[in-house]
Amino acid sequence: MLARRFVSAWGIVAFLLGCLSAVADDWPQWRGPTRDGVWREEGILNKFAAPQLAIRWRQKIGPGYNGPTVADGLVYVMDRQVEPQPVERVHCFDAATGEPRWNYSYDCVYNQVGYQAGPRAAVTMDTGKAYSLGTMGHLFCFDAHSGDMLWKKDLNAEYQIQMPIWGIAASPLIDGQRLILQIGGKHACVVALNKDTGTEVWKALDDRAQYSAPIIIQQAGQPVLVVWTGDAVVGLNPTDGRVFWREPMKPSQMPIGVVTPTVANSRLFVSSFYDGSLMLKLHQDAPTVERVWREMGIDEQHTKGLHCMIGTPILAGDFVYGVDSYGELRCLNADTGERIWESLKAVPKARWSTIHMVENGGRIFMFNERGELLIAKLSPQGFEELSRAKLIEPTRDQLGQRKGVCWSHPAFANRCIFARNDKEIVCVSLSAM
C-alpha cells in the first residue's frame, strides 16, 4: 500500500482575524459536539451584509462527500484523487489561516461502489486524536496535530463487509474508550474498538449496513447506543453491544437511510427516501420503545409526510421539520405524522434536493445544495427566511446533474462556517462582532 504524508513547517499559530475566540466551540465530529446539529456559540450575526459571503480563507482539495470537522484550532476533511492512481486523502488545515498542516494519502480502489466522488464519513476528533474512515473501510487513527499514524485497520478485510452500494458512510462515534462504527460486517454490522489501540471490544448484529451515523442517547437513566441499520432501528448497550430494543424497518428496495436518528422529548425519528418515516416513543422506565406511527407514500414522488434523502430533520417540540425527497421543506405533527405545511422557497425542487439544517439561538442556519446559506425560523406557522447569501459554488463530481451540487455538511465553529465542494474548502466568519 502506498502511503504519503506531508507535514508543514508551520507551528501552532495564534487564533487570528476575529474568527476564533477564547470561548469558541469546536465541531469535532459529525453534526457537532454532541452530534445533534445544534451550534451553541453566541455572538453570531443575524443578517448577511451582502449577497456573497466574504471568504476568510480557501484551500484547494479534491472531490468528497464528507463534511469538515474542527477541533483545537485545526480543520479536517477527506477527498479522493484518481490520477495517477486512486487514493483517498486526509487533510488537516489551520482553522484560522487555512494553512496546510498535514495530509495523509493511501491507495483506495472503489470496488462495486456507486457515486465515486470520495469519502463519506466525517473525521472524528477526540483527546488529541483524529479518526478517519474511508469508503472501502480503511480506518486510521492519527495524532491530530502532527499527523503521525498511531494505528490502522482494514475493516473490509477483517470483518468481511457486505459493502453497501454507496460504500461505508456512517461517521465514527467515540463513547468513553470505545470507537463505535457501523460497517455491515459478517455478524458485525456494528463494531466497537478500543480507541487507543484499535483492538476489538465487541461486535453485534447480523444486519446490513446503513449510511446513518450512530448516536448515544440517555434512556431510562442509562446510555443507549442507537443505530439505524439497513434492516431496523436498534438500541444497544454501548459497553457490550447487547440489544436493548429493536424496531424492524425493512427497506422496500434497498437500504438508503442517510439521515441521523433525531431524538427529543422521548421521541425518536428516522426517515428515508424510498420508505418514508418512522416515529418511536422512548420509554423511560426501561430501555424499550414502541412505534407511534409509520408513514410511507406511494413512491418517492408521491408523499404526504417526509421521505428524507440527505439532510437530517429537526425534531422540536411537537413538530418535525425536514426536507422531502424532491426538496420540499415540510413540517409534520410529531404525534401523528400529519403534514402541517410545505415550502418550496428554501431550495429549488429536484430529486434528492438537499438542505443541511443547524440550530443556533432560536434560528436555523440552512446550507442548501446550491451553495447558499440561509438564516431562517421554522414554526408550525411556516418557514420564515431572515437572510440568504451565496457561500460556495456547486460542483459536478458529487452529482453531474443540475450543474452540480453541494451535498457535504458544513462545520460551525469559532463563529465561522467551514464548507467544501469538490474543488475547495472555505472558511467564512459569521461573527456579529
Image: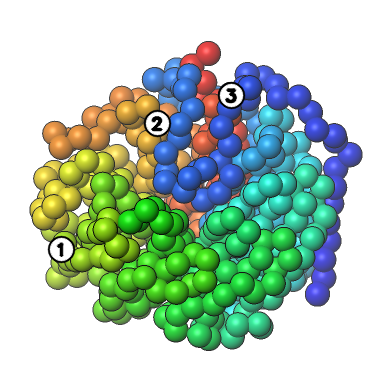
Badge nearest the viewer, 2 or 1? 1
Mark 1 or mark 2, which is nearer the start of the sequence?
A: 1
Q: Quadrant of residue 251?
A: bottom left
Instruction: Please give the residue where the numbered disc 3 appears in the rendered image.
Output: 23
Residue 78 picture location, percent across and down: 64, 55
Q: Distance of mark 2 from mark 1, alpha carbons?
A: 29 Å
* Way the structure is coloured: rainbow
Q: Is residue 248 visible?
A: yes
Q: Disc 2, disc 1: CB below 8 Å?
A: no
Residue visible at 49% across and 78% down?
204
Task: Give the farthest residue toward the right.
Answer: 9
On the image, which quarter does residue 285 sit in? bottom left
Is 44 rendered above or below residue 311?
Answer: above
Residue 208 placement (x, y as % from top left): 43, 80
Q: Does residue 117 appear in this view? A: no
Residue topped by disc 1: 293
Task: Decide which of tag 2 and tag 3 comes sooner along the chain.
Answer: 3
Task: Name the side, left or right, on which 155 lies relative to 113.
Answer: right
Q: Tell which tag, 2 or 3, sits nearer the viewer.
A: 3
Specify the amino acid type for callout 3.
Val
Extreme residue toward the top, this view: 433
Q: Nearer the viewer, residue 159 or 116?
A: 159
Report the disc number at residue 360: 2
Query: Could you say where residue 62 lies in the image, as x and y percent from the top left?
Result: 65, 54
**Cα gap from disc 3 to disc 1, whole angstroms:** 42 Å
- Say what amino acid the circle numbered 1 marks: Trp
The kind of secondary structure element at disc 1 is strand
**Few, some or many C-alpha atoms within 10 Å of disc 1 (few <14, some 14-19, many ≥20)?**
some
Query: Horizontal placement of 66 versus 376: left or right?
Result: right
Secondary element type, mark 3: loop
